[in-house]
Image: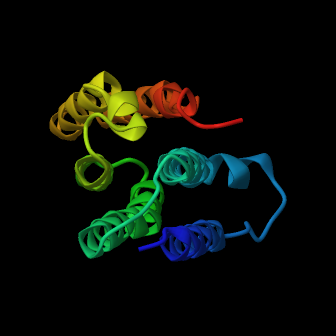
Amino acid sequence: MKKNRIEAFSDGVIAIIITIMVLELKVPHSATWDDLVKLAPVFGSYVLSFIYVAIYWNNHHHLFHATERVSGRILWANIHWLFWLSLMPFASGWMGENHLTELSVAFYGFVLLATALAYVLLTHMLVTHHGVTSSLGQSIGSDQKGKVSIALYVTGIVTAFYQPWISCLLYAVVAAIWFIPDRRIESVLPD
């Protein structure tokens, strides 16, 4: 199958996710610094979540640019990944509205972990479909950044029950690691 529909559908879902997240930001009813300070956890969780969604969109774009064709199994793997990503507005809103409480930060980490694992599965299925000796397969390699990210998510989830702010810092570190598009895939893309 051609890949254009999976790309268009994914782009649409991601656009809706971003829209939902920004609509969850409530405008304060007065214009004081105190009111803005009270919104700091909500705004901070929005910014982190927006960065995560942008990173996923960017890397998904690169991944499918290096993909020649898809299968029904890949379509389902992509839907699975989009399901977990679609929970980002809820997890982000809950964490921000509750001012980074233990359970809300752990749940946010769980959504990040589940989204990452679903993305790993999608990538694995694409590499399997194209072959490990394909350009895509060779560019993915052992995925050290992915393994480090998953370890940091698990650490963040556990740490959330003791020091939620450290968990948020770990989640931000993972975002920083992935902020630059995946150069492994960029190296195989035509100009």
Image quadrant holding the C terminus, namely top right
Image coordinates of residue 128 in percent, x first then y, are 22, 49
Residue drawn at point x = 45 percent, y = 58 percent: 92
80 versus 147 height, above or below: below
Residue drawn at point x = 40 percent, y = 39 percent: 136
177 versus 153 height, above or below: above
Residue 134 horizontal side relative to residue 181, left or right: left
Is residue 104 visible in the rendered image? The answer is: no
Is residue 14 visible in the rendered image? The answer is: yes
Image coordinates of residue 71 in percent, x first then y, are 31, 70
Residue 129 horizontal side relative to residue 90, left or right: left
Residue 123 horizontal side relative to residue 33, left or right: left
Give the farthest residue toward the right: 31
Residue drawn at point x = 47 percent, y = 34 percent: 175
- Quick one: 98 or 110, which is closer to the camera? 110
Image coordinates of residue 14 in percent, x first then y, are 55, 67
User: Total number of numbered labels?
Assistant: 0
Q: What colouring does the structure picture have?
A: rainbow
- Quick one: 42 or 9, which is closer to the camera? 9
Quadrant of the image occupied by residue 55: top right
